Amino acid sequence: MNNFFQENIFAIILFLLLIILLLIALIGVIVVKLLLAPKEVAQPKAAAPAVSPTITPEVVIPNFKKLSEEKVAEKYYCENHPDIPSVGTCLICEDVFCEQCLIEHDGLYFCKEHFKIFANNKWKQITDVKTTPDTPEEGLYIYNFKRHLWNDRKVPSFVLTHYKINIEEDFIESFIQLNVVVDAAVELAEDLEKFKVRH
Protein backbone atom coordinates (compact mmCIF):
# COMPACT_ATOMS: atom_id res chain seq x y z
CA MET A 1 0.00 0.00 0.00
CA ASN A 2 2.89 2.34 0.85
CA ASN A 3 4.41 1.58 -2.56
CA PHE A 4 1.15 2.62 -4.24
CA PHE A 5 1.19 6.02 -2.47
CA GLN A 6 4.89 6.53 -3.14
CA GLU A 7 4.54 5.70 -6.83
CA ASN A 8 1.41 7.83 -7.29
CA ILE A 9 2.15 10.69 -4.86
CA PHE A 10 2.53 13.16 -7.71
CA ALA A 11 -0.85 12.16 -9.20
CA ILE A 12 -2.58 12.37 -5.78
CA ILE A 13 -1.14 15.84 -5.08
CA LEU A 14 -2.15 16.99 -8.57
CA PHE A 15 -5.69 15.63 -8.05
CA LEU A 16 -6.03 17.41 -4.66
CA LEU A 17 -4.72 20.67 -6.16
CA LEU A 18 -7.28 20.38 -8.96
CA ILE A 19 -10.13 19.94 -6.43
CA ILE A 20 -8.90 22.94 -4.40
CA LEU A 21 -8.72 25.10 -7.55
CA LEU A 22 -12.26 24.07 -8.54
CA LEU A 23 -13.56 25.00 -5.07
CA ILE A 24 -11.80 28.38 -5.21
CA ALA A 25 -13.27 29.04 -8.68
CA LEU A 26 -16.76 28.10 -7.46
CA ILE A 27 -16.48 30.42 -4.45
CA GLY A 28 -15.21 33.20 -6.73
CA VAL A 29 -18.20 32.82 -9.07
CA ILE A 30 -20.64 32.96 -6.14
CA VAL A 31 -18.95 36.08 -4.69
CA VAL A 32 -18.98 37.85 -8.10
CA LYS A 33 -22.68 37.03 -8.60
CA LEU A 34 -23.52 38.39 -5.16
CA LEU A 35 -21.56 41.58 -5.78
CA LEU A 36 -23.11 42.16 -9.20
CA ALA A 37 -26.68 41.29 -8.19
CA PRO A 38 -29.03 44.30 -8.41
CA LYS A 39 -29.54 45.84 -5.01
CA GLU A 40 -33.01 46.87 -3.86
CA VAL A 41 -33.20 50.53 -3.00
CA ALA A 42 -35.01 51.03 0.27
CA GLN A 43 -37.82 53.53 -0.09
CA PRO A 44 -38.60 55.81 2.83
CA LYS A 45 -41.72 54.58 4.60
CA ALA A 46 -44.62 56.47 6.05
CA ALA A 47 -44.02 54.96 9.46
CA ALA A 48 -46.71 56.41 11.67
CA PRO A 49 -50.32 55.39 11.77
CA ALA A 50 -51.59 55.02 8.27
CA VAL A 51 -55.32 54.90 8.57
CA SER A 52 -56.11 53.35 5.27
CA PRO A 53 -54.52 50.82 2.94
CA THR A 54 -52.51 52.30 0.08
CA ILE A 55 -51.62 50.72 -3.22
CA THR A 56 -49.13 51.68 -5.90
CA PRO A 57 -50.34 53.42 -9.07
CA GLU A 58 -51.85 51.14 -11.73
CA VAL A 59 -52.52 48.41 -9.15
CA VAL A 60 -56.10 47.54 -8.32
CA ILE A 61 -57.13 45.35 -5.40
CA PRO A 62 -59.19 42.50 -6.84
CA ASN A 63 -62.37 41.12 -5.26
CA PHE A 64 -63.15 44.31 -3.32
CA LYS A 65 -65.97 45.58 -5.51
CA LYS A 66 -67.03 48.13 -2.92
CA LEU A 67 -63.61 49.79 -2.94
CA SER A 68 -63.70 53.24 -4.47
CA GLU A 69 -62.49 53.28 -8.06
CA GLU A 70 -60.16 56.10 -7.18
CA LYS A 71 -56.60 54.76 -7.10
CA VAL A 72 -54.42 55.74 -4.17
CA ALA A 73 -50.79 56.52 -4.88
CA GLU A 74 -48.10 55.86 -2.32
CA LYS A 75 -46.37 59.04 -1.28
CA TYR A 76 -42.91 59.06 0.22
CA TYR A 77 -42.23 62.76 0.65
CA CYS A 78 -43.72 65.42 2.90
CA GLU A 79 -46.68 67.37 1.54
CA ASN A 80 -45.03 70.62 2.70
CA HIS A 81 -41.39 69.70 1.99
CA PRO A 82 -41.11 67.71 -1.27
CA ASP A 83 -37.42 66.97 -0.62
CA ILE A 84 -37.91 65.47 2.88
CA PRO A 85 -39.13 61.87 3.34
CA SER A 86 -42.46 61.49 5.08
CA VAL A 87 -42.76 59.71 8.42
CA GLY A 88 -46.50 59.58 8.94
CA THR A 89 -50.02 60.33 7.80
CA CYS A 90 -52.46 62.90 9.11
CA LEU A 91 -55.58 61.08 10.33
CA ILE A 92 -57.90 63.77 8.98
CA CYS A 93 -56.59 64.71 5.52
CA GLU A 94 -54.59 61.48 4.96
CA ASP A 95 -51.67 63.41 3.42
CA VAL A 96 -48.16 62.39 4.45
CA PHE A 97 -45.77 64.65 6.32
CA CYS A 98 -42.23 64.78 7.68
CA GLU A 99 -41.46 64.71 11.40
CA GLN A 100 -41.36 68.50 11.56
CA CYS A 101 -44.90 68.84 10.15
CA LEU A 102 -46.68 66.15 12.21
CA ILE A 103 -48.09 66.50 15.70
CA GLU A 104 -48.57 63.39 17.86
CA HIS A 105 -51.26 63.23 20.54
CA ASP A 106 -51.86 59.98 22.44
CA GLY A 107 -50.53 57.91 19.55
CA LEU A 108 -52.61 59.80 16.96
CA TYR A 109 -50.91 61.86 14.28
CA PHE A 110 -52.13 65.06 12.63
CA CYS A 111 -50.68 67.73 10.41
CA LYS A 112 -50.40 71.09 12.17
CA GLU A 113 -53.45 72.54 10.43
CA HIS A 114 -55.74 69.63 11.25
CA PHE A 115 -54.46 69.15 14.79
CA LYS A 116 -56.27 72.40 15.56
CA ILE A 117 -59.52 70.84 14.27
CA PHE A 118 -58.89 67.74 16.39
CA ALA A 119 -58.05 69.72 19.53
CA ASN A 120 -60.94 72.19 19.23
CA ASN A 121 -63.71 69.59 18.86
CA LYS A 122 -65.25 66.73 20.80
CA TRP A 123 -65.38 63.46 18.89
CA LYS A 124 -67.82 60.57 18.83
CA GLN A 125 -67.24 57.07 17.48
CA ILE A 126 -70.11 56.10 15.13
CA THR A 127 -68.89 52.70 13.88
CA ASP A 128 -67.30 49.58 15.30
CA VAL A 129 -67.27 47.20 12.35
CA LYS A 130 -65.51 43.89 12.90
CA THR A 131 -63.45 42.35 10.12
CA THR A 132 -61.65 39.02 10.07
CA PRO A 133 -59.10 37.43 7.72
CA ASP A 134 -62.09 35.92 5.85
CA THR A 135 -64.00 39.23 5.61
CA PRO A 136 -61.41 41.99 5.16
CA GLU A 137 -63.69 43.96 2.83
CA GLU A 138 -66.42 44.44 5.46
CA GLY A 139 -65.06 47.80 6.60
CA LEU A 140 -63.99 49.29 3.28
CA TYR A 141 -67.13 51.37 3.00
CA ILE A 142 -66.06 53.21 6.17
CA TYR A 143 -62.76 54.28 4.60
CA ASN A 144 -64.58 55.31 1.42
CA PHE A 145 -67.17 57.28 3.39
CA LYS A 146 -64.42 59.01 5.37
CA ARG A 147 -62.68 60.02 2.11
CA HIS A 148 -66.01 61.19 0.69
CA LEU A 149 -66.63 63.34 3.77
CA TRP A 150 -63.25 65.03 3.45
CA ASN A 151 -62.77 65.24 -0.32
CA ASP A 152 -66.33 66.20 -1.27
CA ARG A 153 -67.69 67.95 1.81
CA LYS A 154 -64.57 69.01 3.78
CA VAL A 155 -66.09 67.38 6.87
CA PRO A 156 -63.32 66.23 9.24
CA SER A 157 -63.35 62.69 10.59
CA PHE A 158 -60.79 60.01 11.33
CA VAL A 159 -60.63 56.23 11.37
CA LEU A 160 -59.02 54.17 14.10
CA THR A 161 -58.51 50.43 13.82
CA HIS A 162 -58.22 48.30 16.93
CA TYR A 163 -57.02 44.72 16.83
CA LYS A 164 -58.06 41.78 18.97
CA ILE A 165 -56.51 38.30 18.91
CA ASN A 166 -59.13 35.55 18.78
CA ILE A 167 -57.25 32.80 20.62
CA GLU A 168 -59.98 30.17 20.25
CA GLU A 169 -59.99 30.35 16.44
CA ASP A 170 -56.38 31.56 16.08
CA PHE A 171 -56.78 34.75 14.05
CA ILE A 172 -56.81 38.51 14.49
CA GLU A 173 -60.03 40.51 14.38
CA SER A 174 -59.98 44.20 13.57
CA PHE A 175 -62.55 46.78 14.62
CA ILE A 176 -62.85 49.81 12.34
CA GLN A 177 -64.06 52.89 14.16
CA LEU A 178 -65.08 56.11 12.42
CA ASN A 179 -64.89 59.17 14.67
CA VAL A 180 -66.77 62.37 13.84
CA VAL A 181 -67.45 65.70 15.54
CA VAL A 182 -70.08 65.18 18.25
CA ASP A 183 -72.44 67.88 16.94
CA ALA A 184 -72.70 66.15 13.55
CA ALA A 185 -72.66 62.54 14.79
CA VAL A 186 -76.38 61.74 14.35
CA GLU A 187 -76.57 63.21 10.86
CA LEU A 188 -73.32 61.54 9.74
CA ALA A 189 -74.38 58.16 11.13
CA GLU A 190 -77.51 58.38 8.96
CA ASP A 191 -75.46 59.50 5.95
CA LEU A 192 -73.11 56.56 6.52
CA GLU A 193 -75.99 54.07 6.41
CA LYS A 194 -77.24 55.56 3.12
CA PHE A 195 -73.68 55.52 1.75
CA LYS A 196 -73.28 51.86 2.72
CA VAL A 197 -76.45 50.90 0.82
CA ARG A 198 -75.41 52.83 -2.31
CA HIS A 199 -71.87 51.48 -2.32
Image: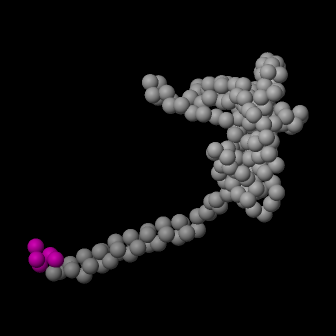
In the image, what residue occupies the spot 50% across and 31% down? 165
The x, y position of residue 72, in whole percent, is 78, 42
In which quadrant is the C terminus drawn?
Answer: top right
Of residue 30 and residue 135, the one placed in the foreground of this image is 135
In the image, what residue occupies the spot 68% across and 30% down? 177
- Within the image, what quadrant is residue 168 found in? top left
Colouring rule applied to residues: one colour
- Within the image, what quadrant is residue 8 found in? bottom left
Of residue 19 and residue 141, the one placed in the foreground of this image is 141
Q: What span is in magenta?
A: 1-5
Inspect this view and state whether residue 57 appears: no
Secondary structure, magenta segment, majority class: helix
* Residue 117 painted magenta: no
The x, y position of residue 67, in whole percent, is 76, 30
Vertical relation: 91 (above or below) 153: below
Inspect this view and state whether residue 31 appears: yes
In which quadrant is the N terminus drawn?
Answer: bottom left
The x, y position of residue 11, in whole percent, is 26, 78
- Within the image, what quadrant is residue 42 found in? bottom right
In the image, what residue occupies the spot 64% across and 34% down? 161
> How many numbered dots are placed on residues in this image?
0
2 with respect to 40 (left or right): left
Vertical relation: 34 (above or below) 95: below
The x, y position of residue 197, in whole percent, is 79, 18
